[in-house]
């Protein structure tokens, strides 16, 4: 056997690796994505949303070891359909959007589950400058030029210093529905 590695072999491997990475690069599509939350206030469910999606996603079901998510939303876009409440949520005691304009999720590991099309994300959630580990399941459905990702998790707002003692529950549910399409850099 000839184990000689030629420059042509190295070049071919680099090209294939680069093509695979470029092929997998996705961007969230703002108009087709939602981040919703539900929290109890005085025992009643209050729903809200965030917009302003940005970031990059490298996702390949056959290459989960190199798959990554690094996405964010604009904290100032919090919307509960109540202007007074939304302005309060943007203030210092809640999201403090002046000093912390972005809520960010970055993966540290993506794993397959025993269900087809279902995966597990291990990562870091950053709110108000505080990053904490997070793990949650999500689905990935292929689309014409990307993926539709859906997942949800529960979290405690006080872990991130969001709000103090009040009539609002500490635990809330976050529901993510992100359409991501291939990133086509401008020429």
Image (cartoon, rainbow, N blue to C red):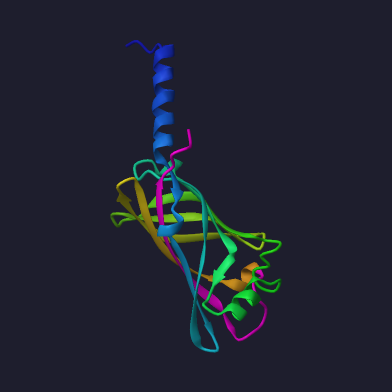
Asked if the stretch drawn in magenta spans residue 60, the answer is: no
| The image quarter in which residue 158 lies | bottom right
Give whichever of 51, 66 is nearer the camera. 51
| Residue 5 shows up from this direction | no
- Tell me residue 62's x, y (percent): 34, 42
Asked if the stretch drawn in magenta spans residue 175, the answer is: yes
- Tell me residue 168's x, y (percent): 58, 82
Q: Which residues are magenta?
A: 161-187
Pick out the residue farthest to the front: 187
State which quarter of the image contains the N terminus.
Answer: top left
Q: Residue at x 51, y 74 (%)?
A: 172
Q: Residue at x 68, y 67 (%)?
A: 96
- Tell me residue 30's x, y (percent): 46, 56
Horizontal side, residue 165 vs residue 42: left or right: right
Count of marks overlaid on the render: 0
- Tell me residue 11's x, y (percent): 43, 18
| The image quarter in which residue 104 lies | bottom right
């Amino acid at each position: 056997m000839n184990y000689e590695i030629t420059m042509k072999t190295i070049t071919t491997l680099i090209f294939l690796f680069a093509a695979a990475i470029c092929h997998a690069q996705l961007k969230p599509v703002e108009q087709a994505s939602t981040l919703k939350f539900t929290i109890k206030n005085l025992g009643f469910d209050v729903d809200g949303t965030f917009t302003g999606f940005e970031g990059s996603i490298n996702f390949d079901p056959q290459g989960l070891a190199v798959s990554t998510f690094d996405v964010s939303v604009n904290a100032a876009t919090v919307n509960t359909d109540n202007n007074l409440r939304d302005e309060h949520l943007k203030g210092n005691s809640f999201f403090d959007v002046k000093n912390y304009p972005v809520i960010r999720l970055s993966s540290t590991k993506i794993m397959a589950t025993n269900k087809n099309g279902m995966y597990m994300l291990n990562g870091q959630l950053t709110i108000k400058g505080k990053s904490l580990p997070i793990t949650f399941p999500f689905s990935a459905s292929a689309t014409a030029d990307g993926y539709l990702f859906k997942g949800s998790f529960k979290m405690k707002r006080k872990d991130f210093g969001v709000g103090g003692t009040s009539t609002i529950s500490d635990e809330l549910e976050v529901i993510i529905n992100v359409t991501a399409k291939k990133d086509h850099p401008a020429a």
